[in-house]
Image (spheres, rainbow, N blue to C red):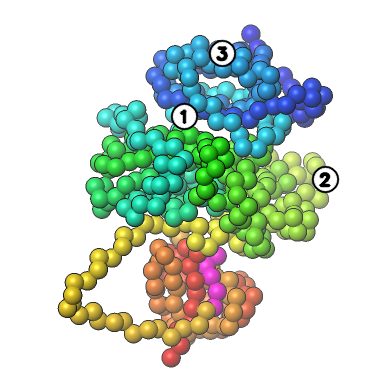
Amino acid sequence: MQLYNTLSAEERAIMIDDAGKQRLTLSFYAYAQISNPTQFRNELFLAWNSLEVLGRIYVASEGINAQLSLPADNFYAFKDSIEVYDFMKGIRLNIAVEQDDHSFLKLTVKVRDKIVADGLVDETFDVTNIGIHLKAKEFNDLLEDPNTIVVDMRNHYESEIGHFTKAIKPDVDTFRESLPIIEEQLAEHKQDKKLLMYCTGGIRCEKASAYFKHKGFENVYQLEGGIIEYTRQVKAEGLESKFIGKNFVFDHRLGERITDDIVSQCHQCGEPCDVHTNCVNEGCHLLFIQCDSCKEKMEGCCSAECVSVIHMPEEEQKAIRRGIKNGNKIFKKGKSDVLTFKNNEETHGVFVAEKPSRSVGTAIKKEPKIKKVYIGKGTHFFPKPSIGQFLIEENEIKIGDTILIKGSTTGEQKVVIEEMLVNDLAQEKAVSGDTCTFKLPFRIRLSDKLYKVLD
């Protein structure tokens, strides 16, 4: 009984090209009680291998999460294979916006503890008690409601290249990180606001909506079918797309173009760009945004160090990466220290409630306006030593200057520079083009602006 792949990715790509068949890329999920996930996994592999299904599928006692491709002429046979199981009868299959015959090059069906890792240990949590599903038009309408808070339930590297207008986009690497952060930020609005969520295909929102209802949020809504189904309905019904940019996808394509808007930047030069790529150094494999110009200049690498590595003999490269496990580090897209431009400005934020209007006759003390000049922007924060890094874009700063750091989350913070490093060397002054670092008593974000306070 064959339960594994016998062909390499390269051999499979050649077979796909030789077959000359159009393939469909699709995704689906279902929450269900599965008593024997291993047996379920084996049954799926045997049924799908014969249908030339390729993809990445996770099964667990709580259900199934699948992203895959298959020959278009096997689509109905595939539907029959999943509808053998009662919980998948009539299931919605999200067909990709853009097709690529090489989106997947092997079939992987893995048994996991959960189909969406949430970090939760709570036996009273009912994952089936979900929020209200909304179709594209209903979602658009609710976006315009002033009492709505819309939250992107994806990771920072996904929302960075595309998102819904007005959305909160938590600066997180994983789904499990986002749940407590959002709960804390919106704790005061469990009753008075409508919580509207979206993700790629709906699976994360399904669990998140149940989680927030479990935590006492009264008005919880989710985008049915996620961004993929939203885009299909927008096109079919001639609606305005409130989603701008690209939808990040977890296959060979790494993104689907939804609108022509480019809302992110090359992580190396800062030019508008939304093309993800993997560093060609196999010992690194960092996934980041790189424009064509930087791709040519850096030979597809994320850093000068990686460029030097790929020019070494193969045996030396193997020796360097032997024993190194990058793991999830490759998904620190836009956060790696080797990248200069990380997380495009204003791509992430927190909800700030509107301030109540003052009653007639109430005296308001006006704060004096701070005279300042723009200097640059935050590019990194080192949490252990509590050091902020900034790119100087205009003017100059020096030791003894009072600076103002301003951002939607940071607020307005003033501090006097007592010492600093400029381009990694202790210096008195930093000018346009320099990268400088200095100690701060607070955390900065990548969208924060740096100003010099004038006398």
* Region rendered in magenta: 375-379
Tell me the chief SS of the magenta region: strand
Whole-percent x, y for residue 17 in the image: 80, 27
Badge 1 local density, few (<14 within 10 Å), some, or many (20+)? Answer: many
Whole-percent x, y for residue 15 in the image: 79, 23
x 44%, y 71%: residue: 406
Question: Looking at this rendering, what residue extends furthest in the front direction?
Answer: 238
User: Looking at numbered disc 1 in the image, what kind of residue is underneath it?
Assistant: Ile
Whole-percent x, y for residue 432 in the image: 62, 79
- Is 248 colored magenta in this rendering? no
- Is 377 colored magenta in this rendering? yes
- C-alpha span from label 2 to label 3: 50 Å
The residue that mark 2 highlights is 313
For the C terminus, the quadrant is bottom left
First reached walking from the N terminus: tag 1 or tag 3: 3
Mark number displayed over residue 252: none
Say what secondary structure mark 3 lies in.
helix
- Residue 327 visible in this rendered orientation of the protein: no
Image mark count: 3
For the N terminus, the quadrant is top right
Asked whether 352 or 452 is in front, the reply is 352
Compared across the picture, whether 66 is left or right of 150 comes to right
User: Looking at numbered disc 2 in the image, what kind of residue is underneath it?
Assistant: Pro
- Depth check, mark 2 against mark 3: the one in front is 3
The residue that mark 3 highlights is 80
- Residue 129 visible in this rendered orientation of the protein: yes
